């Protein structure tokens, strides 16, 4: 465990936590064999690694938003694949510090003990999401304050709020966000859930300019379209219009606007065609297109965090884990 200034919900990894996941082979070095770790928070700023990876294995925010459980499995699926990619001239594990995962077991157990027949079921789930918010925010704030770039994986899009709040507190100013997503997650300020993380970030004055790239017409309420069009800081690119254009060029154009100031990158896997996610869709971006988006954003000097969320792999789903590992490795190159 991290000894100094640790958060109660953080399970900090050492090499022993991933050793059994690595399939070693003579003459080859796997990514996981050379990953960086810490034992004390105070040493984080002195580490050579530029990026800090941690997972959030929960699906409470998704369930609080009337969605399907399953996003809690994304972290381990991704980790199994990531530690087994090759170390070579293109993949440099010394640039990535594996912090660990949030210990979400207690929250998940509390959520499972709630009865769906309870009229306050979703509100009570929202109370648990608030507790997770505080821990996510605290971890992200420490990482960004140490001059590192957090990569956050797993869980629902409710965790965007903690990412934005923590980054803004570390930077001492609100930041911009570009969100690759089929939805805005700008729903009403009701109980906390995966559909209103950005609404709460705006309310807290942690979020400045916000662009949704790939917004789908069929799943956006009219009141949200009206709110965005009346705002000078909320913008979107419709998926239906992007399909007939050079999508990488359009992403680059929107990224340039957001990246003029400090910003975060959000990826909701619902935006990817047929990707196992909490709201899997037959229509969206290809995995390869999303990989290009991630590479472009990762090269921007003002990018302060990367969040991958809503992936919902089935048991022993190696392909989803492999895709998530691609996203991480693309970002840190």
Image: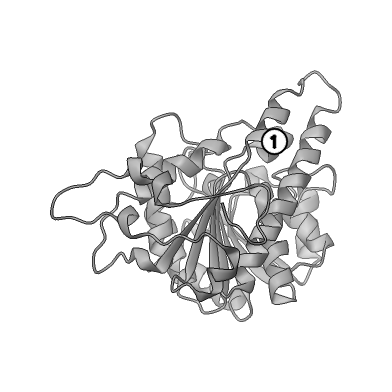
239 or 118: nearer the viewer: 118
Q: Is residue 69 above or below residue 20?
A: above
- Is residue 303 visible to us here? yes
Location of residue 108 (image quadrant): top right
Disc 1 element: helix
Name the colouring of the figure: one colour
Question: Where residue 67 sits: x, y (%)?
Answer: 66, 33
Question: Where residue 32 sits: x, y (%)?
Answer: 34, 53
Using residue 196 as the reference point, say whether residue 12 is left or right of it: left
Location of residue 212 (image quadrant): bottom right
Q: Residue at x 45, y 75 (%)?
A: 299
Q: In this view, does 20 lie above or below 298?
A: above
Q: In this view, does 239 lie above or below 92?
A: above
- Work out which quarter of the rendered image holds the C terminus and state it: bottom left
Q: In this view, does 122 lie above or below 28?
A: above
- Is residue 235 visible to us here? no
* Residue that extends furthest to the left in the rendered view of this protein: 27
Q: Which residue is drawn at 71% across and 32% down?
A: 66
Question: Where residue 45 sits: x, y (%)?
Answer: 55, 74
Which residue is the site of mark 1?
107
């Amino acid at each position: 465990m991290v000894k100094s200034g640790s958060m109660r919900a953080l399970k900090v990894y050492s090499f022993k936590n991933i050793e059994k996941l690595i399939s070693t082979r003579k003459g080859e070095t796997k990514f996981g064999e050379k990953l960086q770790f810490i034992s004390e928070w105070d040493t984080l700023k002195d580490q050579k690694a530029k990026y800090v990876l941690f997972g959030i294995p929960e699906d409470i925010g998704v369930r609080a938003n009337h969605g399907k459980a399953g996003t809690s499995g994304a972290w381990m699926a991704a980790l199994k694949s990531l530690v087994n990619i090759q170390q070579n001239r293109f993949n440099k594990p010394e640039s990535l510090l594996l912090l660990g995962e949030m210990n979400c077991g207690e929250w998940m157990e509390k959520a499972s003990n709630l009865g769906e027949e309870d009229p306050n079921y979703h509100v009570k789930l929202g109370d648990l999401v608030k507790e997770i918010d505080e821990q996510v925010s605290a971890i992200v704030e420490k990482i960004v304050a140490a001059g590192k770039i957090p990569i956050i994986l797993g869980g629902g899009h409710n965790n965007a709020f903690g990412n934005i709040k923590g980054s803004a507190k570390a930077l001492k100013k609100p930041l911009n966000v570009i969100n690759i997503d089929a939805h805005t997650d700008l729903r009403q300020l009701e109980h906390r859930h995966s559909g209103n993380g950005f609404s709460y970030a705006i309310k807290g004055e942690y979020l400045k300019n916000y662009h949704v790239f790939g917004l789908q017409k069929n799943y956006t309420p009219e009141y949200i379209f009206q709110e965005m069009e009346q705002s000078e800081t909320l913008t979107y690119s419709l998926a239906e219009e992007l399909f007939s254009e050079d999508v990488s060029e359009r992403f680059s154009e929107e990224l340039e606007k957001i990246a003029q100031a400090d910003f975060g990158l959000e990826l909701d896997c619902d935006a990817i065609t047929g990707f196992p996610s909490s709201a899997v869709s037959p229509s969206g971006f290809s995995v390869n297109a999303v990989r290009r988006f991630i590479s472009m954003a990762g090269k921007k000097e003002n990018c302060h965090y990367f969040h991958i969320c809503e992936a919902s792999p089935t048991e022993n789903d190696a392909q989803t884990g492999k895709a998530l590992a691609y996203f991480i490795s693309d970002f840190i190159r």
